[in-house]
Image (cartoon, rainbow, N blue to C red):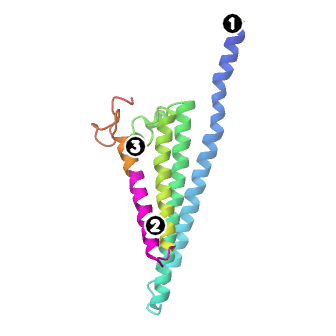
Amino acid sequence: MKWLESTFESMLWQSRVVVLFAVIASLLSAFAMFYLATVDAVYMFVHLAHYWEPGLDAVARADLHGEAVAHVVEIVDGYLLGAVLLIFALGLYELFISKLDVAKGSETSNNVLLIGSLDDLKSRLAKVILMILIVKFFEHVIDMHFDQPLDLLYLAGGIALIGSALWLTHSDDHGEGSHQGAPRGEPTDEHP
């Protein structure tokens, strides 16, 4: 009976390797998002080559400017989504498979990879997803036409909600048990 229990527990423990499928898929998806955003950036620069032309009238220049700003927002959105997928892949690997030995001595790993639990991973992902939502809000605000005073009130309410969300995530970082005393990028005693 003890042998059966030991064998089952060993198989159960080794089953965590199935997470590698999620890690690889997330990495490939992150690379795809970085590729898409980079191609969009290249096409935006090619499209903007006409912006400086003296023969371009003011209306066409304003339209080109508006389109460029919208493209920049889409590009930032693509890169942020790629970053979310990359953080997710690295976090899953560290939580379920093994710590990344290569990252131990890197200063960058302190900013990205201090993931000791699923709550740490959720917190990191939530912050990047919040940034994506802010970029999406900005994208919609660019296209918005303010025809009535109520539209401005809605815009102010949206900005207030974004400010509140950012304040709450910032206050969560500096609450009890946080890294308040440590300089940015330096590990604390909480995370080895």
Q: Which residue is mark 1?
A: 2
N-terminal label among 2 and 1 = 1
Separation of marks 3 and 1 at Cα, in angstroms:
44 Å
Residue placed at 32% from the left, 38% from the top?
A: 186
Q: Is residue 152 magenta?
A: yes
Identified by mark 3, the residue type is: Asn
Identified by mark 2, the residue type is: Tyr
Taking 145 as reference, is 124 above or below it? above
Q: Secondary structure at mark 1?
A: helix
N-terminal label among 3 and 1 = 1
Residue placed at 67% from the left, 22% from the top?
A: 12
Identified by mark 1, the residue type is: Lys
In the rendered structure, the answer to whether residue 114 lies left or right of residue 4 reads left
Taking 103 as reference, is 85 above or below it? below
Main secondary structure along the magenta-highlighted residues: helix
Who is closer to the viewer here, 177 or 89?
177
Q: Which residue is mark 3?
A: 111
- For the image shown, how many numbered marks are present on the structure? 3
The crowd level at tag 3 (other Cα within 10 Å; few <14, some 14-19, many 20+) is few
Q: Where in the figure is residue 82, as x and y percent of width and height? A: 54, 53
Q: Where in the figure is residue 101, as x and y percent of width and height? A: 47, 33
Q: Which residues are magenta?
A: 144-166
Q: Secondary structure at mark 2?
A: helix
Q: Determine the image quadrant of residue 36.
A: bottom right
Taking 186 as reference, is 61 above or below it? below
Residue placed at 45% from the left, 39% from the top?
A: 113
The crowd level at tag 1 (other Cα within 10 Å; few <14, some 14-19, many 20+) is few
**Mark in the foreground, 2 or 3:** 2
Who is closer to the viewer here, 43 or 80?
80
Q: Which residue is mark 2?
A: 154
Who is closer to the viewer here, 133 or 188?
133
